Image (tube, rainbow, N blue to C red):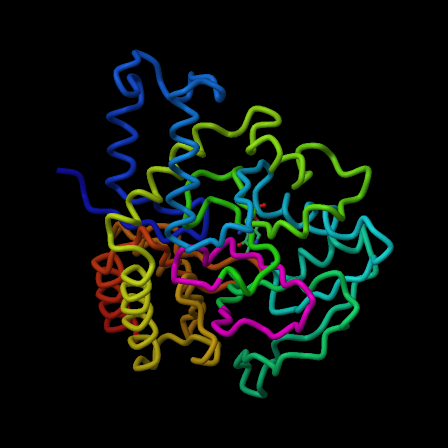
Amino acid sequence: MSKQVYNFCAGPAMLPVEVMERAQREFCNFQGLGASVMELSHRGKPFMAVAEKAEADLRELLAIPANYKVLFMHGGGRGQFSAVPMNLLGGANKKADYLLTGVWAQSAVDEAHKFGDILTHAGVAKTAQGISHLLPTPAFRSEAAYVHYCPNETIDGIEMFDIPATGDVPLVADLSSTILSRPIDVSRFGILYAGAQKNIGPSGLAIAIVRDDLLAQARADVPAVFDYALTAKHDSMFNTPPTYAWYLAALVFEWLKEQGGLTEIEARNRAKAELLYGYIDDSSFYANQVDPACRSRMNVPFQLKDDTLDKLFLAESEAAGLLALKGHRIVGGMRASLYNAMPLAGVEALVGFMERFAKQHG
Ligand code: PMP
């Protein structure tokens, strides 16, 4: 038997093993057709059934109201950084407000500046001890066409569990690294979007959930593949969609339903995060620099108090079958991503390793 390996990569990330085994079984001969799902026309009946089931299951998992379109698009999370302003700032109102909580919120701003009058608001600050914490919700412009925020900052390890109040201004959220990790009230949002490679499936695919009334304010020059209204009109098949990624997403949605849906998944994610943060907080060897009220359940950055041991930690953890723990180059240190597919046993293995390493080198 091969050694048990746990992949803590921030994305592309671990997928449920049951999903990959099923995909492997079906790979060359999908539903007895003698062809791979990858080789099927997106307009043929077998793939259309996959596509429709994926949407229906996602609607069920997130309880998406009927007045929202679910779009399967190209271009990942960053594609949506462009799609959102191109689709919402086409009218006379070019104003959009962005909440700055970390690296990804800032990246969305950098892109939005190309398309409108963008106002940013600080969402986080650091204490004198370097602990990141959330600031009270700022006063967004009441005349803005939308407010954008990133509920889970994959690099900074900051998660916002409360939805900011924006009055009548549509709220847009980049859910790339938290989608499907817990229930969320879709009706509070104008648009939710996510790149797929963390909790959904392979990279490249993006899912946008768009309220119907926001489909009519796109710039005239929005590229067709990023046009929400056109994508909706063609059931996400204006051009050839990323069919294999869509199929894998369908398998992940089915898996999530089998696990008991998002309430059950949230309980598991909470338990995994509590185990790791609890261990870090109790240890004098490791540290996490985020206020407990806004610690990400999906991405746990942590530092060794003696960073000269970082290289050794990474080499030994990898040898122990704990992969991809290196922190993002911007923040350094370590990061363990605990997406839905990471079992509790993976976090237990990580904590066990961290304990042994601290004993040896502390
Ligand atoms: N938003 C967030 C929160 C992310 O974590 C990422 C990728 N890590 C992106 C956007 C960008 O996604 P992509 O690489 O698919 O463009």
Image quarter hosting the N terminus: top left
Question: 206 and 329: which one is in front?
Answer: 206
Q: Position of residue 291 (x, y in %)?
A: 47, 80
Relative to 259, residue 279 above or below = below
- Residue 236 sits in which quadrant? top right
Quarter of the image where one finds residue 63: bottom left
The residue at the far left in this view is: 1
Q: Is residue 45 above or below residue 181?
A: above
Q: Is residue 162 magenta?
A: yes
Q: Main secondary structure of the magenta part?
A: loop
Q: Residue furthest front?
A: 66
State the image quarter where residue 24 is shown. Answer: top left
Question: In the image, residue 276 lies at what x, y percent?
Answer: 31, 70
Is 10 magenta? The answer is no
Given the current orientation, which residue lies at the most extreme bottom position? 128
Residue in view at x 66 percent, y 69 percent: 99
Question: What residue is drawn where x is 25% and y is 55%?
Answer: 260
> As drawn, which residue projects farthest toward the top?
34
Image quadrant containing the C terminus = bottom left
Q: Is residue 42 left or right of residue 100?
A: left
What is the magenta range? 158-185
Q: Residue at x 35, y 61 (%)?
A: 313
Residue at 77% from the left image edge and 72% from the top image edge:
141
Residue 263 location, x and y as percent? 31, 63
53 vs 86, left or right, is: left
User: Residue 255: image x %, image y %?
Assistant: 28, 45
Q: Tell me how many marks there are.
A: 0
